[in-house]
Image (cartoon, coloured by chain):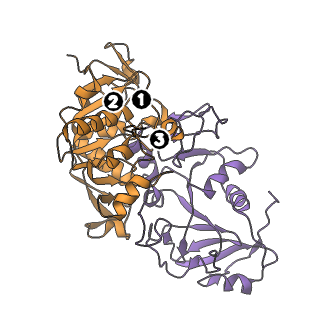
Amino acid sequence: MIAKLSPTQMAWRAAQDIDDGAYVNLGIGFPELVARFQPPGRQAIFHTENGILGFGGAPHPGEEDWDLINAGKKAVTIKPGTAFFHHADSFAMVRGGHLDVAILGAYEVAETGDLANWSTGPKGVPAVGGAMDLVHGARRVAVMTDHVTKDGKPKLVARCTLPLTGVACVTRVYSSHAVIDIEGGHFVLREKLPGLSLDDLQSLTGAELRTPGPVGDLIVPEL
Amino acid sequence: MDKTIGSLALAVATIGDGMTVMIGGFGGSGAPVELIHALIDRFLATGHPHDLTVVNNNAGNGHVGLAALIEAGMVRKLICSFPRSADPVVFTERYLAGRIDLELVPQGTLAERIRAGGAGIPAFYTPTGHGTDLAKGKPVEVFDGRPYVRERWLKADVALVKAHLGDRLGNLTYRMAARNFGPLMCMAAARTIVQVSRIVEPGQIDPEAVVTPGIFVQGLVEVPVPAQEEDLNRAGARYPRVAE
């Protein structure tokens, strides 16, 4: 069993790449953790699809205002500089190229940059929310995901088998084992866990990992 | 001119069978719970309206508001982006049994289709959904080297919206993120009915603060302390109340 990063640690690593003043949308679930780890001296402004820029953290239990929620329907707070707007303006921010970064979860990411993260197939009730909009428009579309499924199968693949969220949209993957860019239809390895050989990482990955440049150690604090 | 309506029952009295009804809200925030419940009351008393097509971001939560409207059997089709919630049992059971139709629309496309409907734009192109199952069969055109999907406007017979303050001319303000789809739906319906926490005289809303201008509103009804869907669900509420 190879050690791997927890979702909290993946979030920490993703947060290191967010610049001061960046406008950022964090997907529902684990990507929301990224907001906790802004490096000192940097302040990102978080966007939520339902019409808030610059919201704060969760209120104390019992102090929720249900007119003030995020896209995951969780209560949030306002802080100095918060702005409200309607849904068409919210998605103008998304599609119009005004967001700097979107960080999403994934079922599968392909070396082509294709993302599948909204449907596991024809069974059940399909739900898409804002995912298909978010993958278009943000200057960087990053994915935060375990490197393999619970069954040990690669989530980074040559071609997605599940229904797509978007075509050629992902630019970087923060996985439990590595940081990988998607360039020119290929996975380009930037960082990997220090105890993990390139061969071992390749065996957990469903498409070729290229290493045109140096590969750094993926070192994250205990969190 | 005075757009105020004296009761919730009167506010929903003209909604007919088979109509398309936009219902504001994102989850519980902005959901016009009292207007929806008044519509259910009318259905239970008269058998109408039924076979509604409802446009909302979601598909209801628990057994109140939109979920209760579906549970009452009044909805034939739902147009939404995310038919899941903490307790989606009402929609899920009907959908899996083939008793309700679903048109799933990406959230930003849903918002823009509604905006376009209100703005007189019959179609537009968006990058969203290109190459996915949700764009199958839709025309695609390349602009500046990038493919875009053509989407149609969305209009409604009636919109039911929750706002915060409304003056007698229909000028509206909203409260925090309860704004969401409200301003868009007000524009896109032939008849827009808004529940507000307080009806005020013209001039009492600063013109700089008006979010929805009154031209988009046909009726206003005052609901001084509106219920929050989340609070109702946490209390285990059902509408209508089940006989003890």
Check chain identity for marks 2 and 3: say if they share one. Answer: no
Establish if B44 lies above or below B122: above
Q: Considering only order in the chain, which callout, 2 or 1, is on the residue closer to the N terminus?
A: 1
Q: Residue at x 32, y 33 (%)?
A: B35
Q: What secondary structure is marked by label 3?
A: loop
- Residue B121 located left or right of residue A182: left
Find out whether the residues at labels 3 and 1 contact each other: C-beta distance under 8 Å.
no
Q: Position of residue A35 (x, y in %)?
A: 66, 49
- Horizontally, is B68 left or right of A144 in the view? left
Residue B126 occupies which quadrant of the picture? bottom left
Inspect the image, locate mark 1, and give the three-letter code of the amino acid beneath it: Tyr
**Apparent colour of chain A:** purple
Q: Which residue is mark 1?
A: B174
- Badge 2: few (under 14), some or many (20 or more) residues near its Cα, within 10 Å? many
Output the chain of dot 1. B
Residue located beneath label 3 in the image: A51
The image position of residue A136, as x and y in percent, is: 45, 60
User: Along the line of sight, which residue is nearer the eye, A181 or A131?
Assistant: A131
Q: CA distance from mark 2 to mark 3?
A: 15 Å
- Residue at the (24%, 51%) spot, across then down: B153
> Badge 2 is on which residue?
B212
Do badges 3 and 1 share one subunit? no
Say left or right for B51 vs B196.
Answer: left
Side (left or right) of B115 relative to A192:
left
For the question of whether residue A60 can be seen, the reply is yes
Real-space CA distance between mark 3 and mark 1, rounded to the nearest whole angstrom:
12 Å
Helix, strand or loop at label 1? It is loop
Question: Do the residues bearing badges 1 and 2 touch, measured as CB atoms within 8 Å?
Answer: yes
Q: Which chain is orange?
A: B
User: Where, by quadrant of the figure, is residue B184 drawn?
Assistant: top left
Residue at 56% across / 54% down in the picture?
A28
